[in-house]
Image (tube, grey):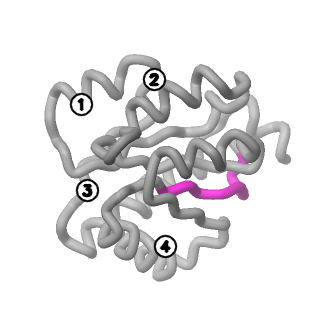
Amino acid sequence: MNKKGQIIIIDDDLQDLDWLAEVFNELEITNEILYFSSGHKAFEFFKDNNSKIFLILSDIVMMNLDGLKLREMLYEHMDVSFKNIPYIFFTTYAEKKFLELASVDSKQGYFVKPRNYDTLKDMIKTILNYWNHAESLSSYDHK
């Protein structure tokens, strides 16, 4: 986990992407933030760029390639160091079946998107704060 690395946002809801862009701008996050509107576009990016990533926020329910399948594909095709990157589900769905599926390989976070901007901002701030203070073995590779 490279704490100065990129923050990757994957969501096919363009309104949610706009809101998240506003939140990251207001929070004055210095990490590079990359937005992907589909799982396929994100997968293509990840094939060449897994070493510079801080964390991934991914929707679950997306057209063609959902967040669960995307994470599964990434874990199958990427090297072991990729598994040190927090893959956090950030979705509109607060359903037990999604939480169970998201917990199969690892559970780095499952958050339900709030519909209130200030709550969204607080949630993103909390997520970033947590992971900025978390330690991992790969953290020592970047110090």
Residue denoted by label 4:
24
Pick the residue in front: 96 or 76. Answer: 76
Say the numbered circle drawn on residue 113. 3
For marks 2 and 4, give the CA distance.
26 Å
Say the numbered circle drawn on residue 98. 1
Query: Callout 4: few (<14), some (14-19), or many (20+) C-alpha neighbours within 10 Å?
Result: some
Element type where label 1 sits in the image: helix
Which range is magenta?
2-9
Q: Position of residue 2 (x, y in %)?
A: 72, 47
- Nearest to the eye among marks 1 and 2: give it: 1
Whether residue 93 is situated above or below residue 12 in the rendered picture: above
For marks 1 and 3, give the CA distance.
14 Å
- Which is more N-terminal, label 3 or label 4? 4
Whether residue 131 is situated above or below residue 37 in the rendered picture: above
Q: Position of residue 25 (x, y in %)?
A: 51, 80
Element type where label 4 sits in the image: helix
- Which is more N-terminal, label 1 or label 4? 4
Q: Is residue 8 magenta?
A: yes
Residue denoted by label 2:
106
Q: Are marks 1 and 3 in contact (CB under 8 Å)?
A: no
Whether residue 49 is situated above or below residue 105 in the rendered picture: below
Residue type of the residue flagged with mark 4: Phe
Pick the residue in front: 126 or 80. Answer: 80
Q: Position of residue 113 (x, y in %)?
A: 25, 56
- Which is more N-terminal, label 4 or label 2? 4
- Which is more N-terminal, label 3 or label 1? 1
